[in-house]
Image (cartoon, rainbow, N blue to C red):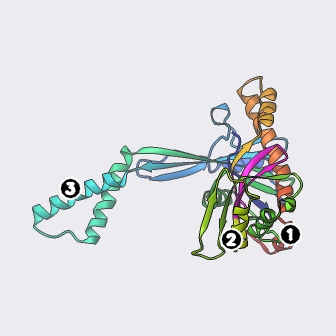
Amino acid sequence: MWFKNLVVYRFTRPFELSAESLQAKLAEAAFHPCRAQEITRQGWSSPMGKLGEQLVYASNGYLLINLRKEEKIIPASVVSDHLTEKVEAIEQEQDRKVRKKERDSLKEEILIDLLPKAFSRFQHTLAFIDPRSGVLVVDASSAKRAEDLCSHLRKTLGSLPVTIPALKQAPNSVMTGWLESEAALPDGFIAGDEAELKEPTDDGSIIRCKNQALFSDEIRAHLDAGKQVAKLALHWRDKLGFLLGEDLIMRRVKFSDTLLDQASDMGQADAAAAFDADFYLMSQEVCSLIPELFDALGGENSESYNAVTV
């Protein structure tokens, strides 16, 4: 259950719900499968999967939750084939042309007829809350998927005072400075061998590189030409590595073998103990990383949070 991506939200007010209170709230919006005529549905389910039924897994002060989403899969080609057959039958039998409005209505009827027979695709989005440091961390590689979870949690709780962290400096500007001089990298962070550089215009060119020495003349030439760093691979204190984006999303997170071995040693008793060890170590390291990363990026502009109401 180690998170593969990290989207961080900052609480603008203290999160004061206990694990028991949060459990009760989520239970009111628990996941239930789609009805026959529903194409999608989402709700809260156990983050432990088959290992437990509780909707909130609490460990060391961290609160783990899981949003489960079901979507019915109806291939567009199948709908198109059914629609073509119906339209051709009507035009032949009634000797008239089927217009767009009627085609749209027929398409809706076909979808309704196919829904009960459609396969389902399930998506799970994990997130954890650290009330002490005031962060919500979502395992999502896109801002949209993370916001979907926040939106559903906000609807469930009635309010969710979170916002994307406000930094004093633009992340792309800071990361560009890091590549301009290796000495500029903050303590605890090492640049990897992957980056994305782009010109600061809507239609500017983009350079993506992997397995590349980033402190090289080749990369320096792109920086001198005005390109800025949009994504940069980083390693933090031999604990984990990730690809940091200018949107502050940490993608493709990989935890060190040392940390994984430590979790394995802690969770030898059974599957539930292994789950607890994984979550304990993962959440602890992520919440240690976050303030160091934000400080390295120039620090948070905490004054801006006072004006945010969500």
- Can residue 21 be seen here? The reply is yes
Q: Nearer the viewer, mark 1 or mark 2?
A: 2
Name above or below for residue 122 compared with residue 94: above
Residue 242's label in the rendered image is: none
Measured as percent of width and height from the top left, residue 37 is found at 41, 52
Q: Give 69 or 291, whichever is nearer the viewer.
A: 291
Verify whether residue 237 appears in magenta.
Answer: yes
Label 3 to label 1: alpha-carbon separation: 61 Å
Q: Please tell me which of labels 1 and 2 falls first in the chain.
A: 2
Residue 227's label in the rendered image is: 2
Which residue does the numbered mark 3 point to in the structure image? 85
Q: SS class of the residue under badge 3?
A: helix
Q: Please tell me which of labels 3 and 2 falls first in the chain.
A: 3
Q: Which residues are magenta?
A: 230-251
Q: SS class of the residue under badge 1?
A: helix
Which residue does the numbered mark 1 point to in the structure image? 302
Measured as percent of width and height from the top left, residue 31 is found at 58, 46
Looking at the rendered structure, the kind of residue marked 1 is Ser
Quadrant placement of the C terminus = bottom right
- Can residue 247 be seen here? The reply is no
Report if the CB atoms under discs 1 and 2 are less than 8 Å apart: no
Label 3 to label 2: alpha-carbon separation: 53 Å
Measured as percent of width and height from the top left, residue 197 is found at 67, 65
User: Badge 3: few (under 14), some or many (20 or more) residues near its Cα, within 10 Å?
Assistant: few
Label 1 to label 2: alpha-carbon separation: 29 Å
Picture residue at 68% right of the left edge, 46% below the top: 4
Name above or below for residue 89 compared with residue 264: below
